Every structure is written in C-alpha cells, then in structure tokens.
C-alpha cells in the first residue's frame, strides 16, 4: 500500500538519562494534505504519533493551517501540508535504542480522501 507521508530522519542524539527533545520531520506528498492533530470536525481522523521502546514524556504537534475545501459548502479544515514537525520529549538510556512506532493519518486532495493509513516509524535514539 502506498504511503502519502514519509519520515525524513532516522537517527537522533539526546542527553542520556534525562528529559530531552527530538523533532520528527515528516513530508506529505505534493497536492495532498492530512488532518492536523486537532481537526475542526470530530468526524475527521486526527494525526497522531505513538512511539514504543522509550519513555515518552510529551508529544507536541504544530498548529495546523487553514484549508478551504473546493466541494460542498467550502468548509474550512485544519491541516498539515508539505513538511511538518512533531516534537517529542523523551528520556533515553545511555547507548543506542532502536525505536518503533506509528504515525496515524488520513491523506486527502482537494476533492476526496484516501482511507486512513498507519505509517510505521523506525529510528534510532542515542543517549550520550
């Protein structure tokens, strides 16, 4: 199945054994958008990051951008387009830790939406 979003980084260096922050950088295919983490309509799927293998303290999403639909009543959505970054505050042990997780999202163009997708996330965090 084709993904419409990609993770742009595969490794991070953080301070070991104390809270630190990484930025997960994502790119959305040209001509598409995905709902932000806080869409304006409760029926829309919010974008969400879930990580395993590390103690995650906080996930901070960027503000979405307004996007006016060209169909229906021209509703205003809250979306991500192009590149966006999600800040993750975490605590990592000393050494290298493989991290896995997912980005749950729904990609749309100006007229319709694709089924919701789950992008597997795999990267390495090195605590120094």
Image: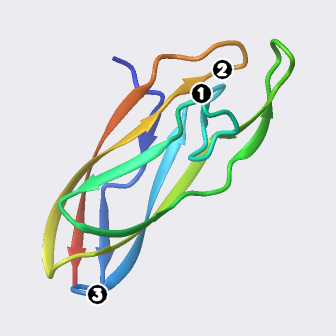
Q: Residues within 10 Å of mark 3 (few under 14, many from 20)?
A: few
Q: What element carries label 3?
A: loop
At horizontal 68% and vertical 48% (from top left) the residue drawn is 64
Q: Where is residue 99 in the image (x, y as percent from the top left)?
A: 21, 57
Q: How far apart are marks 2 and 1 (CA)?
A: 17 Å
Q: Where is residue 120 in the image (x, y as percent from the top left)?
A: 29, 39
Q: Is mark 2 on a helix, strand or loop?
A: loop
Query: Label 2: which residue?
Result: 109
- Lateral position of residue 36 relative to residue 96, left or right: right
The tag earlier along the polypeptide, 3 or 1, is 3
Above/below status of 2 relative to 53: above
Q: Distance between the residues labelled 2 and 3?
A: 41 Å
Query: Label 1: which residue?
Result: 43
At horizontal 38% and vertical 55% (from top left) the residue drawn is 9
Above/below status of 26 relative to 12: above
Q: Distance between the residues labelled 3 and 1?
A: 38 Å
């Amino acid at each position: 199945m084709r993904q419409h979003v990609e993770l742009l980084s595969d490794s991070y260096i953080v301070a070991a054994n104390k809270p630190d922050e990484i930025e997960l950088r994502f790119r959305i295919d040209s001509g598409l958008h995905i709902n932000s983490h806080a869409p304006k309509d409760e029926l829309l799927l919010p974008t969400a990051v879930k990580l395993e293998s590390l103690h995650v303290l906080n996930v901070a999403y960027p503000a979405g951008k307004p996007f006016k639909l060209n169909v229906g009543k021209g509703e205003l959505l809250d979306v991500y387009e192009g590149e966006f970054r999600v800040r993750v505050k975490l605590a990592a042990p000393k050494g290298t830790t493989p991290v896995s997780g997912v980005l749950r999202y729904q990609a749309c163009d100006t007229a319709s939406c694709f089924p919701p997708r789950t992008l597997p996330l795999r990267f390495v965090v090195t605590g120094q």
